[in-house]
Image (cartoon, grey):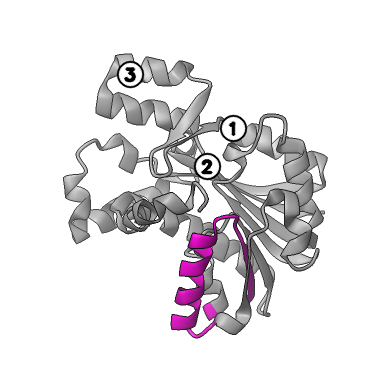
Amino acid sequence: MSRADEHLDAWEAWKSSPWGRIRFALVRDALDEAVASLGDQPLRILDVGGADGFETLPYAVRGHSLTVADPAEGFLDRGRLEAERLVVADRVHWTTAGLDELAEAGGTAYDVVICHFVLQYRPAGALTDDLAALAQVTRPGGLVSIVCPNDAGAVLRTLTRQGPAAARLELNRTTQRSHTFEHESRKLSHAEVAVGLADVGLREESWRGGRVANDLVADDDPKHDPDYFEELLALERELCRRDPYRGVGAFWQLTARRT
């Protein structure tokens, strides 16, 4: 069992939380735009670090071909069951390949390559090779979507929940912590990744900040109210593209096209 497999239940709980649902809604908005920009035809989609395929199985339902690559076999098993339930198992390929083994994931010409909340867990110094690997499996004209935690958002979230002393400690940390997977990870900025993508032939098309408002509201109880949640999500959709708000979200999402 991998370290990620040990946290399957925590992952399930997080997905259904209001803040988890906001994350997935905002990320899906950007993915929908990326997919729509490639025209009305079946696409080949690769989800790197895709866990149980929660973010990308809806695209198999729409008729696209999906490959989910994740080293955690337990997550893939849950994804296989969900694909069967959705009657799309014939359109989804599951592989334990990670970023170092992308060539094993079934080809080198994907229309859309998704790499969400993965790069921050990679070793220091791996960014250049990791971005090159993503570029290599993206066809010319295809799109890459990357999501990573945002350090500025973590500092403000810590301030609202734990106070200024804890926020100062968070500000000066060299790593950040995933509470769902109980794992330390690197800090990666949108600007750093955008420069690295340009170096491997991927031109940034858009970037957004996600969970701007949610993480500044320390009282989580109202977020479970359906009406409050819908208002909060509507606000998030307004803020995610606008400066200066997008710069202080809990995460950032970048989409880039291979030239």
Residue visible at 43% across and 50% down in the picture: 6
Q: Which residues are magenta?
A: 61-88
Local secondary structure at mark 1: loop
Kindly identify which residue carries mark 2: 252
Percent coordinates x, y for residue 185 in the rendering: 53, 33
Residue visible at 72% across and 30% down in the picture: 125
Q: CA distance from mark 1 to mark 2?
A: 8 Å
For the residues bearing labels 1 and 2, Cβ distance under 8 angstroms? yes
Percent coordinates x, y for residue 130 in the rendering: 73, 43
Three-letter code for the amino acid on which mark 2 is drawn: Trp
10 Å crowding of disc 1: few (<14), some (14-19), many (20+): some
Side (left or right) of 131 relative to 221: right
Local secondary structure at mark 3: helix
Residue visible at 29% across and 53% down in the picture: 18
Three-letter code for the amino acid on which mark 3 is drawn: Ala
Q: Is residue 4 visible?
A: yes
Percent coordinates x, y for residue 250 in the rendering: 43, 39
10 Å crowding of disc 3: few (<14), some (14-19), many (20+): some
Residue visible at 17% across and 46% down in the picture: 221
Kindly identify which residue carries mark 1: 189
